[in-house]
Image (spheres, rainbow, N blue to C red):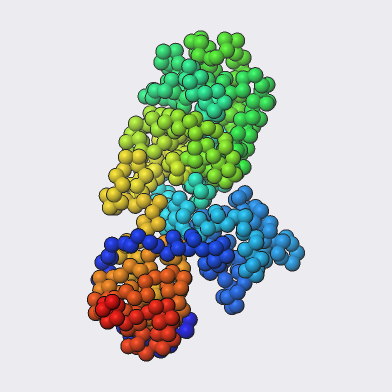
Amino acid sequence: MPIQQKGKPAPKLGSFLMAPEKASSAMSEISTMGATAIDETLLQDFLEDDDQVDISTAKFLRGLSSNGLRTLTDPRFKGLIEKIKKGSIDGDTIPEHMAMEDFKKCIASNMVFITQALCGNLVIPKWGDFTQLMGEIFEECRGLKSGAVADLTDQMAKVSPENYAISICTVDGQRFSAGDCKTPFPIQDLNRILLYSLVCTEKSVEFVHQYIGKEPSGSAGDALALKRKKPHNPLLMTGGLTLASLLKPNLCFSERFEYFLKKCQQFCGNEFVGFNNSLALSLKDRSNRLYAIGHYLRENECFAKADINLDKTMELFIHYCAIEMTCDAASVMAATLASGGLCPLTGEKVVFPDAVRNCLSMMNCCGVNDYSGEFMFEVGLPAKSNISGALVVVIPNVLGMCIYSPRLDRSRNSVRGIQLCKLFTKRFVFHQFDPTDRAKDNKVDPRRKDFTETKDQQSLILLFAAYNGNMNTLYRYLKEGINFGNPDYDGRTALHLAVCGGQVDVVKFLVEKCQVEVNPVDRWKNTPLDDAVKYKYKQIKKLLQKNGGMAGSAVLSS
C-alpha cells in the first residue's frame, strides 16, 4: 500500500469509549449497489497475491469453509463446484485460479447464499470463535471415565467405551465435527422421534394422541406401564411400538422398512444411514421384554387395529432400532428438526412444522429417560438419548447437535453427553429461560456478530487498522456492517487515523467505498483535511478536497 512518508505521526487516540451508534452503516449502502459491485467487494479477500486480478479458488473455498460450509460435500454447492471444475485444463479438477468475470459466472446461482456467508449473516456469524469454544468444551469432557457400555446384546457390549464424538449442524448448514464423528451407531431409541414426527405428518397430531399420551412417566423407558390404557408418551418403548404400528400399516414388511429408511436418509440430508443386520438378529434374540410389552399393549387395546400382526410389528420395530447413522448424520437430523422439518442441506421438506413442534415438546419433557426433569432444569433444551450412547439436542431455529459416547449413567444416558450439554448452556445463552443480557454469568450469544468483541474492542481494532493500512480487517468489518464513522472519546474517526498514517488506499476506501463523513471534527477542532495539511500529505489532501473535504474552521463557521 502506498505510504507518502516513512515517519508517521503518532495517532491521537482517546479512551475508546464509544459514542452512540449512528443509524446508517456501510453495509446498508453496499446492499444498494449493483450486483457487480457487491461481487467485487465480497471477493477482495480472494484475489491472487501476485496479480490482484485473478481469483484464488483455494482462498475462496477456505473462506466459505471458515464460515462452517463444507463446499465439497454440501449438496447446495454441487453445481458451483462442477462449474469451477469446467474451468480447469482437464475439466475434472479445481483450478488454482480463475479470471474474475469467469468466476463470477460460476457463483452467480449461489450468490445470495454466498453473500450471506461472507457478510457474516448466517445464524452463527463468528463460526471460528464458536467452534473454538465448542472444541474446548468437548475436550474438557473427554476425561470423564465413569459409566459403562450397554450390554443389552453381545454386539453392543463390544463397542469401545472410548468412542467420543460431537457434530453440529446449524439451520444454515454450517458444520462442525470432532472426534469419532464417522463411527456409526444404532439409532435405537432415536427412532421414536422420527416415527412420531412422521406419523403426525402423515396422519395428524390428534390421530396419534388417540393412542398415545403426552405425559412424562417418571419410570424406565421399557417399563410395563400405561396411563388410561395409553402409553404415557411417544418416547417410551410402549409409545415407540404403538407408533411403529401406525406408520404405513397397509404396506408389506419390506416396503414399510424401506419407507422408514428412506425418510431417515431425508432427515439426515443423505449423510450416512445404514442397517446393521447382525445387531437386528441379536436384538431379536434378546427381545423378551419387547414382546412382553407388545402383548401388554394388545391386551389393553392400545393398537389401532385389533387384528394387528404382533410378530411382524415387533420384528419391524427391531429393524427400526438396528438402523445406523454417524454423529454427522444425526446432527443433520437434529438440524432438520431445528428448521421445522426442512433439511438445511437439501432444502427438502421432510415433516410438517406442527409435527416438529409437538416432537420437540415431547423431547423437552421426556427425552432423556428418568433424568428428563433435571435435564430440563439444568440444560433447558429439547433432547433425546439412546442406549447406544448418543444424545441429540435441538435448539429451534439455530442448530442441531449430536454427542456420542457409549459410557452410560444409571439413567442410561451418555455421561459425557450430559456433562457437555451442561457446560454448553453454562457458556452460551441457549437455555430456554436464559435472560437476553449477555453479561449474565459471563454467558455469550453466538448468534450475535460481536459476541467475542466488545464495542470498545471493535473501535480500537478499527482505528489501528485504518492507521496501519490493514485492509483485510477493514473489509471484514465492512462486510459485518460496522459503522466506520463512529468516533472515539476525542472525536477521532477512522478517517482521521488513516490520514495520520499516510494511508492513501485506506482514505480512498473510507471516502469512496464506505462513504463516511468527510469532515468530522475532533475535540481539537481538526478535520481529516487539517491533518493532511499538517503532515504534508499532498495526495491525500487532493483526494479529500475532491470529495468535499474542508478545514475545521470552515466547517465550524458554516
User: Outermost residue toward the right?
Assistant: 90
**Quadrant for the C terminus in the image:** bottom left
Of residues 395 and 372, the one nearer the viewer is 395
x and y percent of residue 282 in the render?
59, 28
Q: Give the left or right position of residue 120, taking residue 37 as reference.
A: left
Image position of 388 with respect to 311: above or below: below
Of residues 506 and 333, the one nearer the viewer is 506
Q: Residue at x 65, y 19 (%)?
A: 250
Q: Residue at x 45, y 50 (%)?
A: 123
Of residues 533 and 63, the one nearer the viewer is 533
Q: Residue at x 48, y 16 (%)?
A: 210
Would you say residue 48 is visible in this rendering?
Answer: yes
x and y percent of residue 64 in the render?
54, 59
Image position of 405 with respect to 535: above or below: above
Image position of 98 with respect to 322: above or below: below
Of residues 377 and 467, the one nearer the viewer is 467
